[in-house]
Amino acid sequence: MRIMPLEKRGISNSRIVFGCMGIGGEWNSTPYTKEDYIIAEKAVEAALSIGITMFDHADIYKRGKSESIFGEILKNRPDLRDQIILQSKCGIRFQDDVNPQRFDFSKGHILSSVDGILQRLGVEHLDVLLLHRPDPLMEPEEIAEAFNQLRSAGKVRHFGVSNMTSAQMRFIQNSLPEPLVVNQLEMSLARLDWVEQGILVNQKAGVGINFADGILEHCQMADIQIQAWGPLAQGKFSGRVVEDAPDTIKNTAALVQKMANEKESTPESIVLGWLMKHPARIQPVIGTSSAERVLACQDAVRISEIMTREEWYTLLESSRGTRMP
């Protein structure tokens, strides 16, 4: 079994991350309900039952309620905190009555965000903190001051980023004494620009690819864990029926189901296993709140190990809707 960068660093050996964006009720200020709690608890228990021990949050998810509901689960399961890795993100600020939506990597905002995260989760520290989306006004020295203060206070053990280029990571890293350990990016069979960027080098077809050059290579060389958000592509290839879906989606969904039948597995495990076979040792972050769908992911590691190169390319070509150049 290939070792993930996070495992090399002794942080986590969880091959899949449970993304908590889906738990906590609605995306508004309305309090979550008892039913919302039951859904969240079942999803978390399902994740634990298939070996997932890493949980991903962000201070904005359900406007803080995702962290709050998870904190209630931890309160009712005091033994659980020592068994899991907690990761959260900060840096996105929603529009309010006075200010526009913006990104904020200022020292004061990072520090206050972490205090809020810890309070909602009811814990003393985060294992990993990610900067959520690039802030054009970011100053690496100021970020470093915030990170150093958080580490010294025992509030955060490791740091990373989300949705960043290799240049942005190097820019921030230049001011940090400790390595960034994660970069979280949207990656799936439905979001292929991370593959296309490498395939379409020196071709006109590659001009419009929206994926910065060198991210995968930089992360692999620097042992930065690539985490894939949206890896199940909202169920496009694993059971979600969309009548007006493009033929590429329908054909790929049929192929995924065929492979699942042949390998006595599930479509979800095929889709995740395809991602996890990549040499970058991608760690999918599944965002479903359905316990049933979480359980359907339990075979992904095995699929990543037995999927052949030919099968991997067959899925890629089907999802691209065109033959390799």
Image (cartoon, grey):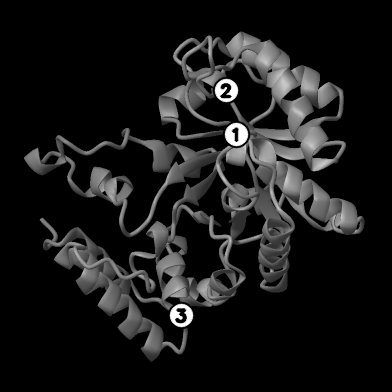
Give the crowd class for mark 3: few <14, some 14-19, many >=20 residues within 10 Å: many
Residue 243, position as x, y percentages in the image:
22, 68
Separation of marks 1 and 2 at Cα, in angstroms? 25 Å
Mark 3, secondary structure of its residue: loop
For the question of whether residue 181 can be seen, the reply is no
For the point 67% across and 63% down, which residue is it? 39
Reply above or below: 111 against 10. above
Q: Tell which circle, 2 or 3, labels the residue nearer the N-terminal end.
A: 2
Residue highlighted by disc 1:
60
Q: Where residue 18 sits: x, y (%)?
A: 62, 57
Count the labels in the image. Answer: 3
Residue of label 2? 173
Work out whether mark 3 precedes mark 1 in sequence or the reverse, and give the earlier one: 1
Report the side of 15 relative to 82 (left or right): left
Secondary structure of the residue carrying tag 2 is helix
Q: Helix, strand, or loop for circle 1?
A: loop
**Residue 197 position (above or below residue 148):** below
Furthest toward the right, the residue is 78
Q: Which residue does the numbered mark 3 point to in the structure image?
A: 266
Q: What residue type is labelled 3?
A: Thr
Q: Residue 165 in the image: state x and y as whole percent.
A: 41, 30
Q: Quadrant of the C terminus?
A: bottom left
The kind of residue tagged 2 is Gln
Residue at mark 2 to residue at mark 3: CA–CA distance: 40 Å
Residue 111 seen in the current view: yes
Residue 242 sits above or below residue 256 on the image: above
Name the mark nearer the viewer: 3 or 1: 1
Taking the spot 46% from the left edge, 89% from the top edge, the residue there is 264
Query: Tag 1: residue type?
Result: Ile
Residue occupying image coordinates x 44% and y 14%: 136
